Amino acid sequence: MAMVDKIAVIGAGLVGRGWAIVCARANRRVALYDSNPEALPLAMQVIEGNLRDLFGFGLINVEPDRLLERIEPTSNLADAVGNASHVQECVLEQVDLKRELFTELDRLADQEAAIASSSSGLPASTFTEHLPGRARCLVAHPVNPPYLIPLVELIPAPWTDEEVVLRTQALMTALGQEPIRTTREIPGFVLNRLQGALLNEAFKLVQDGIVSVEDVDKTIREGLGLRWSFMGPFETIDLNAPGGVVDYIQRYGPMYYEMGQSQAQPREWDEAVATRIERQRRMMLSEDRLQARQAWRDRRLMALAAHKSQANKTITE
């Protein structure tokens, strides 16, 4: 299969490396840019290791060395974005930094190229309003690592061209990702608003001494998370009452409304609760084991991704 399109990934950190894998896996040429030339060899080394893990789990069927050949590291921004059909920015969550970088990207990138930010919380309107080409800018927020967790949130700025959103949505689908889109900008986007609601309640339960940190994790790990790994919350409740979602609402709506009254006031994650959670977490996992546990997490995600892929094939056969 001939490779099509060139995608520029701006920033060779954790997010940028993940995007490079996603794009190369989907038969795209990738220009992986970083302003620090010394960061690029390490990035390629980490990518190679990730590709070999993916190959070992059967999640890619192309030899890692061949995929690596599709990724070209560079510290020249003009070379990176030249002839790219899509630019994916992956730098730190700092408005001034993104504003300065997007000024350069808008100047250097081909006029038809969409320019997307991997921002996990900063809306595109905070750093693209001044650009002549602001209509081609939007947020395409991945979940880490994007080569294992396919969701991508597409959040247009008020001035983003609808055609750019549709084109980016089509690209993400072609890359093997699962895009969703919002109708407008909203603080935290979608995933972090949902995650934040759960985290805020988890912090309260620990802060109030109701339950331990490990038991909160166990509640998700051995309870909600098992269903949520292949169903969303609306499908979950639709299947949890004999008459479906309306029946569920009639049965449990008052209970959730009553609970919501005590959940309505958010609390700051202050030093006291942070210390309590840190102490309990370090009893479960010492700081010197964090990186090893992160690698374990990624391997478990690979195993889950392989299982879901095989399960989907079985269902459709």
Image (tube, rainbow, N blue to C red):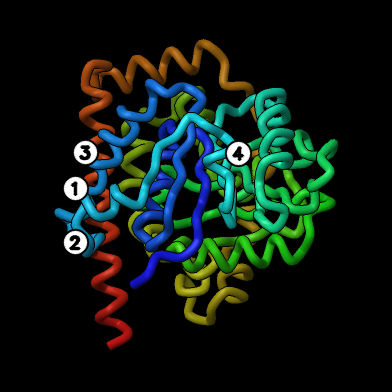
Q: Which residue is mark 3?
A: 296
Q: Which of 19/155 is in front?
A: 19
Instruction: Of the two numbered discs 3 and 1 on the same chain, state the one appearing first in sequence.
Output: 1
Residue at x-position 66% and y-position 31%: 101
* SS for callout 1: helix
Spatial separation of the CA atoms under disc 1 and disc 2: 10 Å
Label 1 packing within 10 angstroms: few (<14), some (14-19), many (20+)? some
Instruction: Of the two numbered discs 1 and 2 on the same chain, state the one appearing first in sequence.
Output: 1
Horizontal placement of 110 versus 228: left or right?
right
Label 4 packing within 10 angstroms: few (<14), some (14-19), many (20+)? many
Q: Is residue 314 above or below residue 146?
A: below
**Closer to the camera: disc 4 or disc 3?**
4
Instruction: Of the two numbered discs 2 and 3 on the same chain, state the one appearing first in sequence.
Output: 2
Q: Which of 191/94 is in front?
A: 94
Q: Which residue is mark 2?
A: 58
The amino acid sitting under disc 2 is: Gly
Residue 247 figure quarter: bottom right
Label 3 packing within 10 angstroms: few (<14), some (14-19), many (20+)? few
Horizontal placement of 314 versus 161: left or right?
left
Residue at x-position 48% and y-position 68%: 174
Contact (Cβ within 8 Å) of mark 2 with mark 4: no
The amino acid sitting under disc 1 is: Arg
Q: Which residue is mark 4?
A: 119
Spatial separation of the CA atoms under disc 2 and disc 4: 30 Å
* SS for callout 3: helix
Residue 17 figure quarter: top left
* SS for callout 2: loop
Residue at x-position 30% and y-position 50%: 69
**Closer to the camera: disc 3 or disc 1?**
1
Q: Which residue is mark 1?
A: 52
The amino acid sitting under disc 4 is: Ser
